[in-house]
Image (spheres, rainbow, N blue to C red):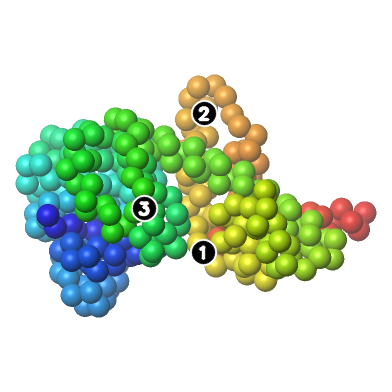
Amino acid sequence: MQVGVIGLGAMGNGMAANLAAAGLLAGVWNRTQSKAAAFAAEHGVTHFADPAALAAAVDVVITSVSADADLLEVIESLHGALSPGTVVVDTSTVAPETAVRAAERLRSGGGELLDAPVSGGPEGACQGSLVMMVGGEAEVLERIRPLLDPISRAVYHMGPVGTGQATKAVNQIAVAGVMQGVAAGLAYARQQGLDVGQVVEVIGGGAASSWQLVQRGPNVAQEHFPPGFKLQLHRKDLEIVRAALRARGCALELIERTLADYDALIEQGYADEDISALYRLRRDELAALAQQ
């Protein structure tokens, strides 16, 4: 079986590179054509002219796009181009309802969708160590599972289409809480006159350790916030969570606080920074309180 990748952003590029190294990648398509052309030339694969051409040439399509509307646009472009039994594995983070809509549209054209959001960040995408949480038919997942080995260290079947995205929402809520704690703790360390880099090393080996602390803490210590996970994208994901909660007449304080923080950072021009930029707010809040 051959795979095509649609979307060569921070996550898609790493996944595509690992598939190419495994000899499984037929080619790529990206909205920014120059990026796809450069990738194809580097890895010796085809740069397809459009998503439909890619879909017609492969058995499995992996999509990695930024938003619900982008995914639905891609799915529409694939309709009519898929051979019977072609599988689309969507690794984007979208609403569960969007995944269901996409699956219904694909089935009407003979294809199958697995909603398969991932966790592990760009580092995991490059290292082939992503965790995938998959919604869809179990038989379909088992049929294409070997193609996921080069890009993932663990693949979990969560249930029907939409459950992958629901599980990813849990992940994004937890990430918000962890990053809020890391930002507050390291801002406190700075206020106390500690060496923030040393603090990261020390507590990174104890009960307060987390992926966010270990991977992002060294950058925070230097007050440098390259993406990683752009805060505007995490904001988009948390807005999906907020909408789901509101539909049930409830809310989570953590979500509301983090969205408000992200809005403040975006207004200051930090939309493309990593979510660890939350440290900016906690640092400045503590400094302001200390001056009162």
Q: Residue at coordinates 29% horizontally, 65% vertically from top-left?
A: 18
User: Horizontal and vertical percent for residue 80?
Assistant: 9, 45
Q: Secondary structure at mark 1?
A: loop
Residue topped by disc 1: 227
Neighbourhood count class around disc 1 (C-alpha, 10 Å): few under 14, some 14–19, many 20 upward: some
User: Horizontal and vertical percent for residue 15?
Assistant: 31, 61
The numbered mark at residue 153 is 3
Q: Residue at coordinates 63% horizontally, 53% vertically from top-left?
A: 209
Q: CA distance from mark 2 to mark 1?
A: 28 Å
- The image shows a total of numbered marks equal to 3
Sequence-first tag of 1 and 3? 3
Q: CA distance from mark 3 to mark 2?
A: 31 Å
Mark 3 or 2: in front is 3
Residue 46 visible? The answer is yes
Three-letter code for the amino acid on which mark 2 is drawn? Leu
Residue topped by disc 2: 245
